[in-house]
Image: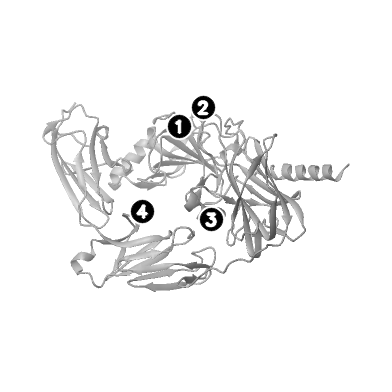
Amino acid sequence: MTQTLLRLLLCFCIISSAFSQAPEVPEDYFANPMEIPLILSGSFGELRSNHFHSGLDIKTQQREGIPVYAPADGFVSRIKVSHYGYGKALYIKHDNGYSTVYAHLSNYAGAIQQYVKKQQYKKESYEIELFPEAQMLAVKKGDLIAYSGNSGSSGGPHLHFEIRDGASRPMNPMLFGIDIPDDKKPLINSVIAYPQGEGAHVNNGFEPVKLRLIPQKDGSFKTEKLKAQGRIGFGISAYDQMNGASNKNGVYQIKTTFNGESKLNVLFDRFSFNETRYLNQYIDYGYWQRNKSRVQRLFVAPNNPLSLFKNQDADGLIDIEPGYQGVYSIVVRDFQDNTVRIDIPIAGEAPSNSPKESNKEGLDFVSAVENTSITKGKFSVFIPSNSLYEDVYLDIQAEADTLQFHVDEVPIHKNITLSFDASNYAEADLDKLYIGRLNYKGEPYYNTTYRKGKKLSIRTRTFGTYVLASDRQSPTITPVNFQDGKWISNNKTLRLKIEDEESGIKSYRATINGKFILMEYNYKKDVLTYDFDDAVISETENKLKLVVVDNVGNSTTFEATFFRKQS
């Protein structure tokens, strides 16, 4: 048997072994949560802003209200209703110790809906979190539990569906037999080589280099031969498309080898919520901010304890010396075993030039493992230890009421505190001030601002430009489907548009004839909706009062009278 054949067999065994390392789970226990063809708009482990996606996003045919069924016996353990995030969410604990989660719902069903509505009225709050006693809301496999929707921070109608283990760690639902048709190979956007450490280079350069991909007849890729020296790592931008959809979903596994020996295996099977933000250290965060393409770094960067890394050889980097020849390979796989391979031939060669010294004049050095306090003009910055993943030099400049706090190309893991000394502002003005981060339009976006005396503070996990802003405008309230003094007997709902152009809406409260009514806030459309099926009102002549408050305390009161026939 030739040496080449032995190497190929060894590589095959390594890949096959690595591809079979998913945790053992009950594959026939959970049924599908909906009786429609399962087509995904988002996969498990998909790379999102500041987190890995914790479930499957199931398309709902561009509409809301599709029935959602319990996939197994259990009981409702948690219910959360929020304006943002998961919106209307439902959590079920199952008899086998696993839990399922359903998010962005339009409504709950049956006894669950009645229980939620009763508690919302009892607490006089739309946003609510409930933990029913075990078996209080028991469900059987196939029971109707909810209806799909678009609530919370959803970008369109769909069902977000999760399966969590006994330690509340989200797991890939496809491991449990949730079958999604997929006969398409993953797609490769780009591959990047990263020189790491002193003296490392790629093609005579000391910065990351994007490699040209050369398609091969068998569907794989090859790159031109790299000339390199020192410690080298690689990164890849890849996604998967499944049958029936064009969405760019995440891949299931990325396996790397060097000359047939395993280097790093990334498997999207399970993770914990307390590690999910380490995604920002896993990807090339700066490249993402500049190019809006997430490159997964196929080596373990400092301070990155992700459990998605399996069987890595040290940190996944390779060491290249002059005269050395080798091949670095990347295999990308989706859950249905469709794979793509990229081979990168490497030749060890010393660089013909030397790296340039970077100019750090005027920059502030911050150690990742120490507390750091920095004062610039009227601003002060406190960076707790372990807020940053690595030591870094920051460009921090202040001018009047504006702080240029580096640029958003370095990830922040834990909150950093920014404070502003507002001693030169009159007492009457202080309550209307806030610190905001400038958005892409150059407008301040409200950050929750705390005040102690004449000191204003925020906590943030994003670099960028921050300004001291003032909001003196009250929210606006506009009726949508009724008019003051008119009959609305045929209305099923009462709808009002609420807007605040400055600091944003903080709270609202509505009453009819002095009695609290529950209004659902759709922040994406700036609309409040009251459902007359709640049967809170029993009068023909009704007086509506709505008070809306923005984030700095400006308030607006809207009052109107409407008439409605009683059945």
Dots 3, 1 in contact, CB < 8 A: no
Query: Disc 4 designates what residue?
Result: 439
Estimate the x, y position of residue 68 in percent, counting from the top left.
45, 32
State the CA–CA distance, disc 3 to disc 2: 34 Å
Mark 4: give few (<14), some (14-19) or many (20+) Cα within 10 Å: few
* Sequence order check, earlier mark of 4 and 3: 3
State the CA–CA distance, disc 3 to disc 1: 32 Å
* Sequence order check, earlier mark of 3 and 2: 2
* Sequence order check, earlier mark of 3 and 1: 1
Point out which mark residue 68 bears. 1
Q: Nearer the viewer, residue 356 or 315?
A: 356
View extreme (front): residue: 352
Picture quadrant where residue 519 is located: top left
Q: Label 3 amino acid?
A: Tyr
Q: Nearer the viewer, residue 403 or 345?
A: 345
Q: Is residue 279 above or below residue 466?
A: above
* Sequence order check, earlier mark of 4 and 2: 2
Q: Label 1 amino acid?
A: Val
Q: Does dot 4 land on a helix, a strand or a loop?
A: loop
Q: Is residue 383 above or below residue 254?
A: below
Looking at the image, is mark 4 or mark 3 nearer the viewer? 4
Mark 3: give few (<14), some (14-19) or many (20+) Cα within 10 Å: many
Q: Nearer the viewer, residue 86 or 68?
A: 86
* Sequence order check, earlier mark of 1 and 2: 2
Estimate the x, y position of residue 28 in percent, counting from the top left.
61, 33
